[in-house]
Amino acid sequence: MTIAVFQGMKTRVQSASHAAGRALGCAALIASVVTGAAQAQQVTVTIPAAPGGGWDGTARLTMQALQSEKLVTGGLQYVNKGGGVGIIGLTDFVRNNKGNDNALMFMGVIMLGAIITNNSAITMDNVVPLARLTREYNAIAVPIDSPIKTAADLATALKQNPGAVAVGGSGVGTVDHLTLALVAKTQGVSADKLNFISFSGGEIVPALVGGKIKAAISGVSELYPLAQAGRIRLIAITSETRLPNVDAPTLKEGGLDVTVSNWRGVTGSPGMSDAARKGWIEKLDALSKSKSWAAALEKQGVEDAYLSGDAFTAFIAAENKNWQALLKEAGIVK
């Protein structure tokens, strides 16, 4: 596999001293990649969503933590490519970063759902899984003056007239969409009757506050701070039990037997060398044990779900099968 430093090297004859210097520099870089020492070159970080959403926050806080721990010392180039619930960003990442050992993409379980529902030609098989990072649960929020006071109220409204209840989320086939579909299913309402509206990144909050939708489903870390500020109201969270420091009941407390979680992770580029893969995993392993990572988790309001290397690759394969079954159960795919 090609190390990125070799890309674009000219083939002209060089002086012996210049060539020797280049050779020593390349050898040093290879040693750095293999041992997982500090990454000194610029890293291109693809975020397949608009700025302000969960993936964006995870990516930026993770990279900042890597820099704080001196595991990455070079510059960072963030590339936000929203649309298609991550499919546009995934496609762009695969097409433009082949063999680039210094290119990363942040992603999560909703990308798996989008790949399935869109029959995407480009899948997780086209990238190199590095590590699962975080896990969080969804929250269901309504405008502050909404007549919908509880999850049971929402379920009743969906049962009475599902088309009249516009609910926003990150996209078809995502954790957000699945949450709504499973809530509706408890009332005997099929997914094709729902008025689910897709939003990218941080666009959902203005839509909710502005009254363009009657409810929003997104990560607790995205919605809870706005609830604390009095801008919106949380009516439920999708965890099994109540979360510490989050003043909101679970769906189960509202009589709805629905539990859904969301995880996020990071991958390398297609064709990433084995040495670079090993180096990035070592950096992320070291980060996962650091104070900077603990601080990043606290700032995001998410759980540590660290899993790296081959174990993460196997996890993605299992999750893909799991999501195919869940989306069929919810009636989102046939």
Image: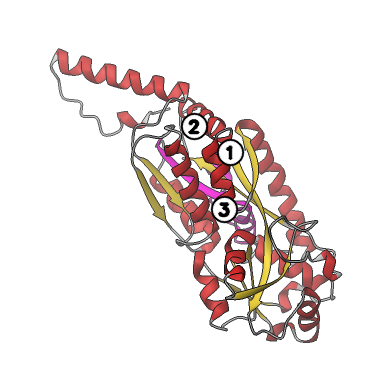
The amino acid pointed to by label 2 is Trp
Measure the C-alpha gap from mark 3 to mark 2: 22 Å
Where does label 3 land, which residue?
A: 300
Residue 99 figure quarter: top left
Name the residue at 34% across, 39% down: 42
Measure the C-alpha gap from mark 3 to mark 1: 17 Å
CB of mark 1 within 8 Å of CB of mark 2? no
Q: Earlier in the sequence, mark 1 or mark 2?
A: 1
Q: Residues within 10 Å of mark 3 (few under 14, many from 20)?
A: some
Q: Which secondary structure, mark 1? A: strand
Q: Residues within 10 Å of mark 1 (few under 14, many from 20)?
A: many
Per the rendered image, the range of residues in magenta is: 101-130
The amino acid pointed to by label 3 is Gln
Where does label 2 land, which residue?
A: 280
Name the residue at 73% across, 48% down: 321
Nearest the camera: 204 or 277?
A: 204
Q: Which secondary structure, mark 2? A: helix
Identify the disc placed on residue 131.
1
Q: Residues within 10 Å of mark 2 (few under 14, many from 20)?
A: many
Q: Earlier in the sequence, mark 3 or mark 2?
A: 2
Residue 199 shows in this picture: yes
The amino acid pointed to by label 1 is Ala
Judge left or right: residue 93 versus residue 216: left
> Residue 249's spot in the image, x, y percent?
77, 66
